[in-house]
Image (spheres, helix red, strand yellow):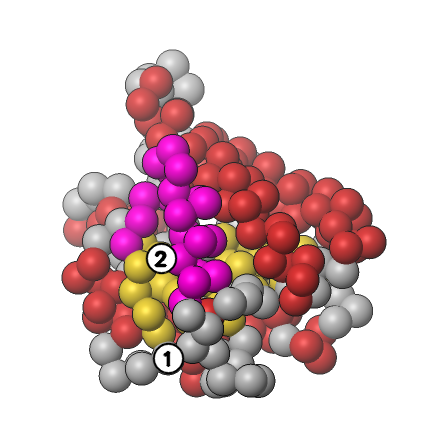
Amino acid sequence: MNTAAPHSRIVVVTGAGTGIGRATARAFAAEGALVVAIGRRLEPLAETAAGHDRITPLTADITAEGEPDRILRTVLERHGRLDVLVNNAGIVRSGALGALAPETITTQLATNLVAPILLTQAALPLLEESRGVIVNVSTSVGQRAWPGSSVYAATKTALELLTRSWAVELAPRGIRAVAVAPGAIDTPIGEHQGLTPERMAAVREWQLAHTPLGRIGRPEEVAWAITQLAAPAASFVTGVVLPVDGGAVVA
């Protein structure tokens, strides 16, 4: 059933349970969009949606077989259309070359690279109908060396190349593809990869030393960039990868 108001944009955000995904879902909802918030666990998604009646949680493992099609069927049944797809879900598993377990490699490839490809592919018919937008969430370290997290950086660099390639490939179908590349942002990503508080503090110290603006960014600042790139007013912008990193890439 189509529950969208006549002028509401329909937005899907993956990895919406915490951090940048949560902030992005709320930012789109604040603009009047109807948001489907995707994540593996219902509890964080419910927290994202709390107090925001324009956000609908949908639990899904985007790496599981058949899930991209199920997600898009659900969006179509509930809202009848899709205007913006935000591929935000990502995981980090650190490890030096020579000590990488196969699972460390394949899990990051599956979540950070393969899943966005398959979900975007499933979304193409709806995005073509709406002349919609794909927003990929990369990382500023994808443009630099990151020893110890090379697989993660490689997946995000690949996502940026996909963004540029899709921008050209999909332009004749009226679909835009853009990306944001966050730097050091205050999210639970360190805790999610199992870093101790001491290790996380050391990481933050290094990040601050390499961020010219001298502070850690907020998820809401990345969400702002995502909503602006996806906005109708940005209709002539495609193929761009926008750093949101306090100047880290250019330092």
Quarter that holds the N terminus: bottom left
* Front residue (pair 192, 169): 169
Q: Main secondary structure of the magenta part?
A: helix
Where disc 2 sits, the SS reads strand
Q: Magenta stretch?
A: 59-78
Residue 70, magenta (yes or no): yes
Occupied quadrant, residue 184: bottom left
The percent coordinates of residue 11 (x first, y second) are 49, 68
Q: Residue at x 22, y 70 (%)?
A: 47
Residue located at (43% from left, 63% from top): 77
Q: Is residue 89 above or below residue 8?
A: above
Left or right: where 110 falls relative to 198: right
- Taking the image as drawn, is residue 70 in sight? yes
Label 1: how many Cα within 10 Å (few below 14, some 14–19, many 20+): many
Q: CA distance from mark 1 to mark 2?
A: 14 Å
Residue 165 in the image: x percent, y percent?
73, 43
Residue topped by disc 2: 38
Dot 1: element? loop
Q: Is residue 242 above or below residue 234?
A: above
The amino acid beneath tag 2 is: Ile
Residue at horizontal 55%, vertical 84%?
A: 6
Q: Earlier in the sequence, mark 1 or mark 2?
A: 2
Q: Which residue position holds label 1?
A: 54
Amino acid on which disc 1 is placed: Arg
Q: Can residue 199 be seen in this snapshot?
A: no
Vertical comparison of 183 with 223: above or below: above
**Image quadrant where residue 110 sits:** top left
- The quadrant in which residue 229 appears is bottom right
